[in-house]
């Protein structure tokens, strides 16, 4: 396992966000410095919006989000170099015909030679168990392999933080285990939005988002117990 990196400070200062007349986040103030952070909550509670603010995919309507001291509204490009994002459905991120080409595509603006881009792409595919599929069509991969490919295409850029939005939702048990094992070995700071409570049960910190607010912020045991009570109405 690669030595873990020092986590960045991710700050939410009185953050709110609205889509038109619909408020999805209200008065969120957080300082996140742990290496592995889970975000859980019922559908429509605001957790995905919260996660997307970490790399500037969504900017606050009010308040500010900073990552390593960089404001996501004013320094979005620099923030996205530090924060990689994996979507729920990897097919939305896979854009090239073959596996190795898709990872190389992430390096298109790196200034590296084509030989070096290929070398780095193959290196990251080897690390995540996809080297044997390098020249295969992406659409022939299993669901778990596609999720790992999407992750590899993010990790080849060597971000400091990886945010994953419901990465196991579309996966069967075997592929879910594959992604979970990979997450466990990442040196990067990791933020995971999920309905899979077991996935974040050994994380450092779990946030429960409900009604646009962080209603529980604790270690996994108490946070997940509290979320179960909210979700089941007990």
Image (spheres, rainbow, N blue to C red):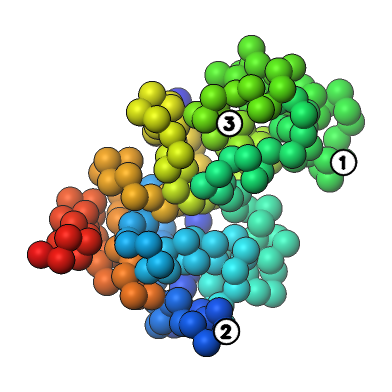
Q: Which of 154 and 4 is in front in this view?
A: 154
State the CA–CA distance, disc 1 to disc 2: 40 Å
Residue at x 50% of width, y 56% of height? 8
Q: Quadrant of the N terminus?
A: top left
Q: Is residue 114 left or right of residue 93?
A: right
Can you tell which of label 1 and label 2 is closer to the viewer?
A: 2
Residue 111: image tag: 1
Is 8 rendered above or below residue 106? Answer: below
> How many residues crowd around disc 3 within 10 Å: few (fewer than 14), some, or many (20 or more)?
many
Q: Nearer the viewer, residue 169 or 59?
A: 169
Can you tell which of label 1 and label 3 is closer to the viewer?
A: 3
Dot 2 corresponds to which residue? 20
Is 148 rendered above or below residue 61? Answer: above
Residue at x 77% of width, y 22% of height? 119
Q: In which quarter of the image is the C terminus?
A: bottom left
State the CA–CA distance, disc 1 to disc 3: 26 Å
Q: Where is residue 9 in the image (x, y as percent from the top left)?
A: 48, 61
Instruction: Say what secondary structure mark 1 lies in.
Output: loop
Does the CB distance between marks 1 and 2 fall below 8 Å? no
State the CA–CA distance, disc 2 to disc 3: 34 Å
């Amino acid at each position: 396992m690669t030595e873990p990196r020092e986590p960045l400070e991710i700050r939410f200062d009185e953050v709110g966000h609205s889509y038109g007349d619909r408020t999805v986040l209200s008065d969120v103030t957080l300082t996140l410095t742990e290496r592995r952070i889970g975000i859980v909550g019922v559908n429509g509670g605001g957790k995905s919006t919260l996660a997307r603010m970490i790399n500037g995919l969504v900017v606050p309507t009010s308040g500010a989000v900073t990552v390593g001291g960089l404001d996501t509204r004013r320094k979005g490009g620099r923030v996205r170099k530090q924060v990689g994002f994996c979507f729920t459905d990897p097919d939305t991120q896979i854009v090239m015909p073959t596996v190795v080409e898709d990872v190389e595509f992430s390096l298109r603006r790196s200034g590296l030679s084509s030989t070096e881009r290929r070398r780095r792409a193959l290196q990251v595919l080897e690390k995540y168990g996809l080297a044997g599929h390098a020249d295969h069509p992406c659409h022939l991969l299993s669901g778990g392999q596609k999720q790992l490919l999407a992750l590899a295409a993010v990790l080849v850029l060597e971000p400091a933080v990886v945010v994953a939005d419901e990465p196991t939702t579309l996966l069967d048990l075997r592929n879910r285990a594959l992604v979970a094992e990979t997450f466990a070995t990442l040196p990067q700071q990791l933020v995971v939005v999920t309905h899979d409570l077991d996935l974040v049960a050994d994380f450092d910190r779990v946030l429960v988002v409900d009604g646009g607010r962080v209603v529980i912020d604790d270690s996994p045991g108490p946070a997940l117990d509290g979320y179960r009570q909210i979700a089941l109405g007990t």
